[in-house]
Image: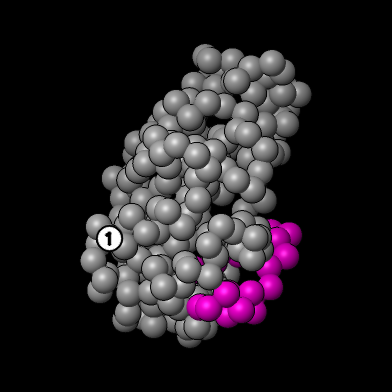
Amino acid sequence: MLLFGGTFDPVHPAHLAMAREALALCRADSLILLPAGDPPHREAPGASAEHRLRMLALACAGDPRLRIDPRELRRPGPSYSLLTAREYRDECGEDTPVLLVLGADAAAGLGSWHGARELPGLVHLLVLARPGARFDPLLPERLGWQSAQDVASLLGCAAGRFLQHTGPLMEHSATAVRGALREGGTDEVGLLDPAVLAYIREHGLYRSGSD
């Protein structure tokens, strides 16, 4: 089982590229996207939970492998990955491999995550390279994950292993997309899924003073 969390504010091509890279790497049938309700490691999202969920659904509509789980949007309090990992472990049982997929930029902050040292007992960690991200590959080991040589090592047990993978690198970031939307730029905005861009414009998202 592949879990890929994020704020998706808004969802953009790099998000989808990483999701599909993880699917291909693991030869998986599906990947679960988990939009965060109250992300504890960044400022409040620029769009509401309802808008972000709808944009994510529009972006994923053409790919049935991409499934959306809104549980973190509905759970009160900060969207801690630890709580989600516990829930999935309870739901999947103790023997099912569960992989937490992270971009290297997000993984760089793992040391400050709530209950980070408990995560290796619940999930594997699959880190995908991101342009410009400074990620210490020894960090997962310091937190309790064991380094894996390949995906087969991850899929051979339920949790506790770490793999870093360098796949197709995409420069896009939600910060750059939001900035382009505010300033009327076209380079980043033009790469958004057309349905997502139409939704953003219809609802006036990411303008000054919008939600």
Q: Give 135 or 16, whichever is nearer the viewer.
A: 135
Instruction: Say which amino acid is labelled 1.
Output: Asp
Q: Is residue 186 in view?
A: no
Which stretch appears magenta?
A: 125-145
Q: Work out which residue is located at the far right of the displayed protein and give it.
A: 183
Q: Quadrant of residue 191?
A: top right
Q: Give 184 or 128, whichever is nearer the viewer.
A: 128
Quadrant containing the N terminus is: bottom left
Q: Residue 140: x percent and y percent?
A: 58, 74
Q: How is the rendered protein coloured?
A: one colour
Q: Is residue 36 in view?
A: yes
Q: Vertically, is 67 above or below 120?
A: above
Residue located at (41% from left, 39% from top): 75
Residue located at (42% from left, 53% from top): 83
Q: Residue 103: x percent and y percent?
A: 57, 59
Q: Vertically, is 186 above or below 152?
A: above
Label 1: which residue? 90
Q: Residues within 10 Å of mark 1 (few under 14, many from 20)?
A: few
Q: Residue 208: x percent and y percent?
A: 72, 18
